[in-house]
Image (cartoon, rainbow, N blue to C red):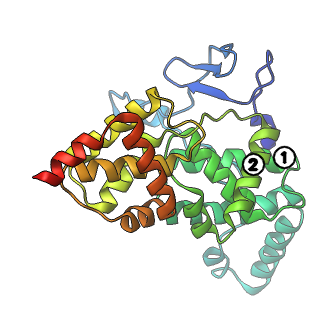
């Protein structure tokens, strides 16, 4: 069974943005809401057992399927090297030749996936991403390879673009600067590849919420929970006043934290906040002025300065 057989599409709208509900055994299209399948078979192990005989019957072998393996974890390999060295010379040479031919007859897509998924695991580990994000990124990259979207682009840039798309879909805040540092690819190139892949694969991604970055920035700046909560409130007011539209989420989040820190007497310099958020001091200053003028926060800051 090939990997392409596992790629599902919505028969109604053609979207690949699907949600698998394992508890109900359903596959639902996130874009149009169509229930594609409602009687899925659960192949996981049955944990209920009442005696040793029942346990033997219910036990299933093999690891679960995963996109982080080039063959979905279903492939086999001709012996491990440690096992082959225990054989006699003639048998050992025969199995080494079999291993070599097994690699040679693998398709170009499989060879590409072997290298790319190793790079994806390395970048994911560097960024400390959860398993769900790594799995989603591997799925996006596999689809991109199968559609021929990797041709003419570096493997690393497509891997970084897939990781960034997965982070956005799972609302795990990571900036393009962090992806650039992890992959060694320029930020502009990652952004360009990310937009191309999501457009070609029809992946719908909502704009980043600035509030998602507050916890990380607050932790790096060692600010109190009160300051963090107040920054989220400031962002909510800014969103109601439409101050966040058309502005970078990291910049507005950093500015809200800077204002909240001033109000709570935890002074941090604009340079410190800018370094943590990966933006310039000018951005912090501009967003800071906009928040003060539009939300009327000048009075609160003046009260703190008088104290």
Q: For numbered disc 2, what is the local secondary structure?
A: helix
Which of the numbered marks, if any, corresponds to residue 113?
A: none
Asked whether 12 or 176 is in front, the reply is: 176
- Whole-percent x, y for residue 243 in the image: 50, 36
Quadrant showing the N terminus: top right
Q: Residue at x 37, y 34 (%)?
A: 295
Point out residue 264 in the picture as x, y percentages from the top left corner. 19, 49
Q: Which residue is mark 1?
A: 146
Q: Which of the 4 image quadrants contains residue 120? A: bottom right
* View extreme (bottom): residue: 89
In the image shown, does 246 or 228 lie closer to the viewer? 246
Residue 142: give its label. Answer: 2
**Distance (Cα) linking label 1 and label 2:** 6 Å
42 left or right, relative to 191:
left
Total number of numbered discs in the rendering: 2
Asked if the residues shown at circle 1 and circle 2 are in contact, with their CB atoms under 8 angstroms apart, the answer is yes
Q: Position of residue 82 (x, y in %)?
A: 61, 77
- Rendered location of residue 233, percent (x, y): 32, 34
Position above or below: 71 against 17: below
**In the picture provided, is 156 more to the left or to the right than 278?**
right
């Amino acid at each position: 069974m090939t990997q392409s057989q596992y790629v599902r599409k919505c028969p109604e709208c053609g979207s690949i943005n699907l949600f698998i509900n394992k508890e109900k055994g359903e596959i639902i299209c996130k874009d149009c809401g169509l229930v594609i399948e409602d009687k899925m078979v659960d192949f996981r192990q049955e944990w209920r057992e009442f005696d040793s005989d029942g346990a033997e019957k219910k036990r299933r072998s093999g690891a679960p399927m995963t996109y982080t393996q080039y063959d979905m974890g279903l492939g086999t390999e001709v012996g491990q090297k440690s096992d082959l060295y225990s054989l006699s010379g003639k048998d050992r040479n025969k199995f080494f030749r079999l291993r070599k031919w097994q690699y040679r007859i693998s398709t170009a897509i499989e060879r590409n996936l072997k290298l790319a998924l190793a790079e994806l695991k390395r970048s994911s580990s560097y960024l400390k991403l959860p398993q769900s994000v790594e799995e989603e990124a591997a799925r996006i990259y596999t689809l991109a390879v199968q559609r021929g979207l990797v041709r003419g682009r570096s493997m690393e840039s497509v891997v970084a673009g897939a990781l960034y798309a997965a982070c956005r879909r799972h609302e795990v805040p990571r900036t393009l600067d962090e992806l650039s540092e992890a992959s060694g690819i320029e930020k502009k190139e990652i952004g360009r590849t990310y937009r191309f892949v999501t457009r070609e694969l029809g992946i719908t991604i909502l704009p980043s919420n600035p509030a998602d970055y507050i916890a990380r920035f607050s932790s790096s700046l060692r600010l109190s929970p009160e300051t963090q909560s107040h920054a989220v409130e400031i962002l909510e007011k800014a969103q109601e006043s439409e101050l966040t539209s058309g502005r970078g989420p990291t910049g507005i989040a950093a500015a809200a934290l800077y204002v909240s820190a001033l109000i709570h007497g935890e002074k941090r310099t604009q340079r410190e906040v800018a370094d943590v958020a990966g933006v310039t001091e000018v951005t912090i200053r501009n967003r800071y002025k906009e928040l003060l003028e539009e939300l009327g926060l000048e009075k609160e800051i003046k009260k703190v300065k008088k104290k």
